[in-house]
Amino acid sequence: MEKVPMTSAGYKMLQDELKERTSVERPRIVDAIAEARAHGDLSENAEYHAAKEAQSLNEGRISELEDKLSRAEIIDVSKLSGDIVKFGATVTLIDEDTEEEKKYMIVGDVESDVKHNKVSISSPIARALIGKSIGDSVEVAAPGGARSYEIVDVRFI
């Protein structure tokens, strides 16, 4: 069974979603199914079919969350240190073409969120950064073409 690396914040996020889906969403869907059943003929009851589909999707997501939580390898970022980029690092980069500064935290696949500057350990940029240190220049094969960055800071927050 392959372990799923994640930060403690990512683990808590998955636990919270699982709790929400099992204690709030599941009973809501069961009530919707019961109400739709009360309307009579199930073969032509769109509300019933929609509620059953919602139940199927919710149960599928619950199974997925339980699987990821059971295989989680929680990495405590606060106990990491050094100037070499690894899982959990918050890396500050300078785009060598535009001089634009970017900051990314390298996290597990399940908690990546580009809008919040959290990139997956399996993303092209993270793969290019892993093992590098401050002052190194890296080239990232991005969908819009190759980009070059200089690593100016590595922190573990």
Image (cartoon, rainbow, N blue to C red):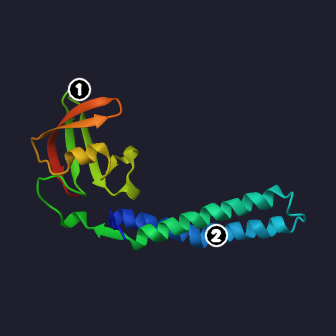
The N terminus - image quarter: bottom left
Q: Which mark is residue 26?
A: 2
Residue 29 appears left or right of 4: right
Give the quarter of the image for residue 58. Answer: bottom right
Q: Is residue 135 above or below residue 6?
A: above
Q: In the shown orientation, is residue 2 left or right of residue 94?
A: right
Question: SS of the residue at dot 1?
Answer: loop
Q: Can you give x and y, in whole percent of width and height, for residue 153 in the image?
A: 15, 46
Q: Residue at x 13, y 53 (%)?
A: 84
Residue 132 horizontal/vertical position (percent): 14, 48
| CB under 8 Å between discs 2 and 1 | no
| Corner quadrant of residue 37 | bottom right
Identify which residue is drawn at 17% across, 63% down: 80
Residue carrying label 1: 98
Identify which residue is drawn at 69% across, 66% down.
29
How far apart are labels 2 and 1 at the CA level?
49 Å
Nearest to N terminus: mark 2 or mark 1: 2
Residue found farthest to the right: 40
Badge 2 crowding class, 10 Å Cα cut-off, few under 14, some 14 to 19, many 20 or more, is some
Q: Position of residue 150 (x, y in %)?
A: 15, 37
Q: Where residue 156 sits in the image (x, y, percent)? A: 20, 57
What numbered label is drawn on residue 65? Answer: none
> Which amino acid does the dot numbered 2 rest on?
Arg
The amino acid marked with disc number 1 is Thr
Q: Is residue 71 above or below residue 104?
A: below
Which is nearer the eye, 139 or 156? Answer: 139
Q: Residue at x 75, y 65 (%)?
A: 32
Packing grade of label 1 (10 A; few <14, some 14-19, many >=20) is few
User: Residue 86 or 145: which is nearer the viewer?
Assistant: 145
